[in-house]
Image (cartoon, coloured by chain):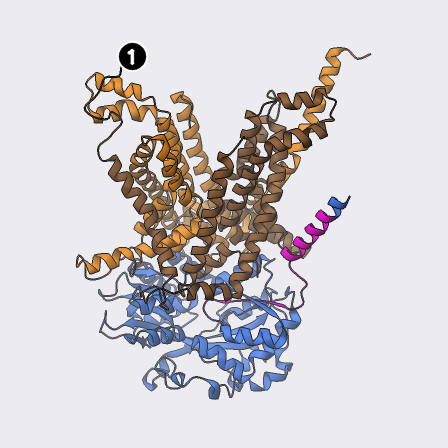
Chain colours: A blue, B brown, C orange
Amino acid sequence: MKWKTTTAAAAVTVFALAGTASAEGELNIYNWGDYTSPELIKKFEETYKVKVTITDYDSNDTALAKVRAGGHGFDIVVPSANYVPIFVAEGLLLEARPDQMENFKNVDERWVNVPWDEGRHYTVPWQWGLSGTGVNTKVYGGDINTSAIFLDPPAELVGKINVAPEMNDVLFSAIKYFGGDWCTDDKELLKKVRDKLVEAKPKWLAMDYSVTEKLPAGDYAAVFYWNGAIMRSRIKNPDIKFGYPKEGFPYFMDSVAILKDAKNVDNAKLFMNFIMEPENAAMISAFAKYANGIKGSEQFMPDDMKDAPELVVPAEFEAAGEFLLSCSPEVQQLYTRIWTDVQK
Amino acid sequence: MARRQRAYDIRRQPGFGLIALFTFFALYLPIAALVAYSFNAADSLSRWDGLSLRWFISAWNNQAVQDASIRSLLLATWAATLATIAATMAALATTRTPNYPGLTFKYAFINQPLMVPEIVTGVALLIVFSRIKVWTGYTGMGYLILAHTAFCIPFAYLPIRARLESMDLTLERAAADLYATPWRAFWRVTLPLLRPAIIAGFMLAFVISLDDVVITEFVKSGGQDTLPTYMLGQLRRETSPEINAIATVFLALSVVLVTVFYFVNRRRP
Amino acid sequence: MATAAETARAAEARDRRDRWLLSAPGLIIIFVAAIGPLFVMLAYSFMEKADYGDVKFGVFSLEGWVSVLFQRDIFDDTLGLADAHLSILWRSISLSLYTTVLTLLFGFPTAYFIATRPATTREVWVFLVTIPFWTNLLIRTFAMQQVIRNEGLINTALISLGIIERPWQIMNTDLAILLGMTYVYLPLMVLPLYASIEKLDFRLIEAGYDLYASRWQVLRRIVIPLVKPGIVAGSILVFIPSLGAYVIPRVLGGGKSMMLGNLIELQFGAGRNWPLGAAISITLMALVMVALLFYVRNVSRSGASHG
């Protein structure tokens, strides 16, 4: 009898430890890899006595697939602007009404009435930036302000290029490379885009997100990637230079959203409010080196970000930038199929 | 009959020794490199800055690593315990008997997890479990424990079945002759004789569960990273030699377990 | 009154029932968490894919199976061979075969070497093979990465010796996957080979030499036929996990050199085509079954007991 009670007690204890503990005091964040400031998380944990777990993903598609499958156990996800409408349409997001939160007043007006979340009923800004090229100038000394770096790579770079595994950024650049408009359904042009990408892919080394380590270390000689990660690479290795593709480059914004089946909604809301505080938003940017969309955060930012060549778009390239928005479902489906062709 | 003395050793094959030594060298060189780099003082894997324990300390202080380690150990304990119990029962049911209908079926069933590639089991479990997770709302560790138990059973089963098949029946018969109930005879005679095999089976299952990355990757919910899946996530980024330190500790743990397993198995009565 | 025969039959029936009850927990767990899901997956492979992952439940479609081998052209909707899938299938099979050959080339002499050591040191050598065998696969893959990466052991050595100027790009290529799989699966080849060579009757070899056979002839005509079951067992043990490899190509292949395992993951992740992923999984399983059948037939035909 005694033996039985002891065993039962032990079993209950271990199960309690192994099972998800009570929802209180926890927060599960599903975010892009290498994107979340550890200091920010530490501060949040200490302020609210909440234990935060971060899980990485490498593309919007991966995140969408995992969340869509269900039973993921995450509370927060950070999709890009063009994916937010899909998440909303699929009924995956909670209408958390961040626009009624205390710190919402700090959000830059530019990022309040955005097309993917009019009036910010679902999401708050996390970071925004742009995609461009990053080249090790010791390996290649030519013009880097062009998408040709990865679409028609010069001989020095062939086999040493990493391309972000993100459908929309890559397709955007390729469409612009042929002079098309984003969201075009011109099949002539898209055929050229597909063929070009299929032709270029064997010249790439990887489609991965380990840029901040491998680009400065010399494992990659060039990347098509996001400006913040390239800036971090340049800090480690001054030979790295950032290029603004003159044919056209996309701006992106990733936004924090709460998932509909989140278990820790209260903590997730606390987190939303928390990151709209200028000092905290600055921590996000200081780590990942992207701008954040919160007014007044500049004063808390490290000096090296104020005039970084990766972050301040030179006047001559300003016209080439365009915000990456979602296209109609039909066009999106067409793009997905092109991308599948490329990815396989 | 006297053996003729030969001028050469008939067992020798030229070059085999060299290839073998090269193989052993190649088998241990990467591991040695991994361990060496874990003591590297530099921030990056690309440089060597002298000896230091800083990455071990930093790994030790890393909350995510701590959580993942504890989760891995708990999971392995659970899965190995359940698998060993189920495997012992199954071994008792499938040995020391003339062939009966369903016996081959049971063998095939129990060994099935060994035949199917892990990735296939992984995605199949993803399909089924994600639906169950949505239906029940329960997203706890139960799924991982169940999945691990399933693929641990054949490993626990192997040594226990082997031991049962080679075991002497006389002691059990003697117990039965002395009017011991079958349960008492099992508890007092069979089980003590089986103990080394049960321990061996448990340890095999434990190591197998501890090592699993593929099935865990597909079954886990948010915040359920085990040490291997945590490492898999980090590996794509190679952020720091901290990952080497974790790997070195993991490696040491495996070596200890294998050594213990080896001696437990050798000292069988 | 029951006859002796009836009592015996009743006892036998009871024994059967007990044996089913005893094995029930194990069988149920394996059914729920290993075999059952495979049938669900089979059903999924015949359903229509939903837009963002998952399937349209109960909607029958052969699209998943068709797209294993064929693809519709995006622009003119004609059906052609899915060369991307075929090339991944081919890479999986050929890399697995190469891995098997390489592990055999290195594993056979190693196993032979161990088996011909004196009994006292033999155990130590076996133990040295066993340790990597039980070490986490991920850690061994990672260890391999330290050797072949651009700043790794091989490149550092070659550059400092002045043999090459620029790092030799091994990471993220098929060669990296091949080296990784050979390294990781080598113990799976050595152990069964060793078990088989150890049982070898060296008097037969002596007889061969007495008949003036050369070393090569002895190896080819006597040793190899006798240890064939070990060779087949080792090859199967290496070939099957190579075919289903996922971690090694993911870590060493850089997300570009895919094998079947990664293609399956892609369909359940970013590719969001579950029926296709399910169909490829079942294809992979079928390939494994073919390899196993080959094994069973070969071992039973050679008539020897396998080790």
Under circle 1, the secondary element is: loop
* Chain containing the residue with disc 1: B
Image height of A296 relative to B105, above or below? below
Q: Is residue A212 left or right of residue A20?
A: left
Question: Foreground: A317 or C171?
Answer: C171
Q: Quadrant of the N terminus of chain B?
A: top left
What residue is at 30 percent from the left and 25 percent from the top?
C223
Q: Is residue C154 left or right of residue C26?
A: left
Residue A186, position as x, y percentages in the image = 39, 66
What residue is at 63 percent from the left and 69 percent from the top?
A94
Image height of A183 relative to A334, above or below? below
Residue A8, position as x, y percentages in the image = 72, 48
Residue bearing mark 1 = B1
Residue C40, position as x, y percentages in the image = 58, 44
Question: Foreground: C104 or B187?
Answer: B187
Determine which quarter of the picture holds residue C2.
top right
Image height of A315 relative to A151, above or below? below
Magenta-drawn segment? A6-34
